[in-house]
Image (cartoon, rainbow, N blue to C red):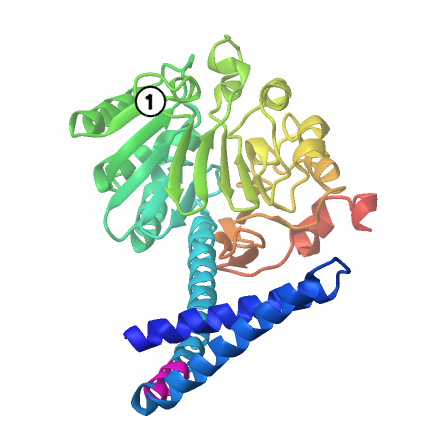
Amino acid sequence: MKKLNKIAKNFLCLTLAATLGASFAACDFGGVDSVLNSAISDANSSLDDVLSDMSSMPGETSSKTESSSDVESDLESSENSSESVESSSEESSSEENSSSGGVEEEENKISPLDVHFLHVGNATSGDCTLIKSGNTEILIDAGSTTGSIGTIVPYIKSYCTDGILEYVIATHAHQDHIAGFTNSSSQGKGIFESFECKTIIDFPKTTVTSKLYGEYVSLRDAEVKAGAKHYTALECWNNANGAQRSFTIADGITLNILYQKYYESSTSNENNNSVCTLITQGENNYLFTGDLESGGEKSLVQSNKLPKCKLFKAGHHGSNTSNTTELLSVIQPEVVVANCCCGDKFGFPHQEFIDNVAPYTDKVYIPSMSSSSGFVLLNGNIVVSSTDGKTVRVNCSNNNTLFKDTKWFEENRKFPSYWA
């Protein structure tokens, strides 16, 4: 070790002497020659010492050579290690990106959604809509009469296999929307006694005092006593008493309670008390307005930032008192379902409804039509589905014929210019 130190010192001296020599050689000062000669002599002496020391240390020289080789090896190893770190960093970055992508993908995950518009088993127009995503079900209305119970309850049971309806919405107090919630001596138990209802949302105001409405209230309250939560649409809008304006149904799917002024203002038209809801699934929007009339639709447009809608359940069964251009021009629906029995005693769906919808779509579907024997199916049960929250498909239990292509339409309605 001492000889190695000596070699190092002598080598430094040699280097210093050479450096001084080069520096002074470039200058023209007096006495330079003597200084330079002395420096060169010292450098030569140091070099001799270095060479002498190295020759007397064959073992250490060999060791030093090996050490130098080891250093080179270490450098290569270090470079390899650096490459390995870079590779590992890249892999880590790739994993992070993959992980980040996974998180983003998880955040953007959209659950499938099916919207079932049920035919109600008779010639009386009425609403009954089952919305399903995974094991979560939403039921909006249960019409049209107590005679519909034997049709709608078995259908709903075939999809709601756990017997639990997570959300039940009654839009307003007319028979063709609430009769199926009650019971029938001939048809059996209605919705409230056939299913466990978790959350019930209904209308804040009504002027109805019928016996049927009283039965609805009694059975609803029995569900509440058994553990159901009950809110009015106004409580939901105000996020009051535990209610929410928006409920998460599944990944990427929300049930949103909209506002319209007749939740608080009095009206002589019971239809305007209707609860209005918007279901969003990814980029898709589905609008349900019950039997809301033109005045209510105006308030709905003014009170909410309504999006374009993939699906619109026609207001008031396709009536000329609803489905205004003021609403339709905003939501511009791609698919419209009118829950009615064509040609019933009210003449649904009206020509004005068709004319107002026509600029936006010809994809209009209707469950049934009246006949000499009572009623026959047109589309039957209509199911609008989406697996990606971007597109929808329509499948019907009877046929997928567009309303404009039916014989009933040809014989009873006029083609709007947009459909010609």
Asked if 419 appears above or below 280 in the picture, the reply is: below
Q: Residue at x 40, y 16 (%)?
A: 204
| x 26%, y 53%: residue | 161
Q: Is residue 304 above or below residue 318?
A: above
Report the magenta residues as a range.
Answer: 61-70
In the image, 311 versus 27, the foreground residue is 27
**Residue 50 sits in quarter:** bottom left
Residue linked to disc 1? 231
> Secondary structure under badge 1?
strand
Please state if 179 lies on the left or on the right of 215 as rendered: right
Quarter of the figure with residue 69: bottom left
**What quarter of the picture does the N terminus occupy?**
bottom left
Q: Residue 132: image x %, image y %?
A: 39, 48
Q: Does the magenta portion include 64? A: yes
Q: Amino acid at mark 1?
A: Tyr
Q: How far from the left and from the top, in percent, is residue 372? A: 54, 48
User: Which residue is at 30% across, 17% downward?
Assistant: 241
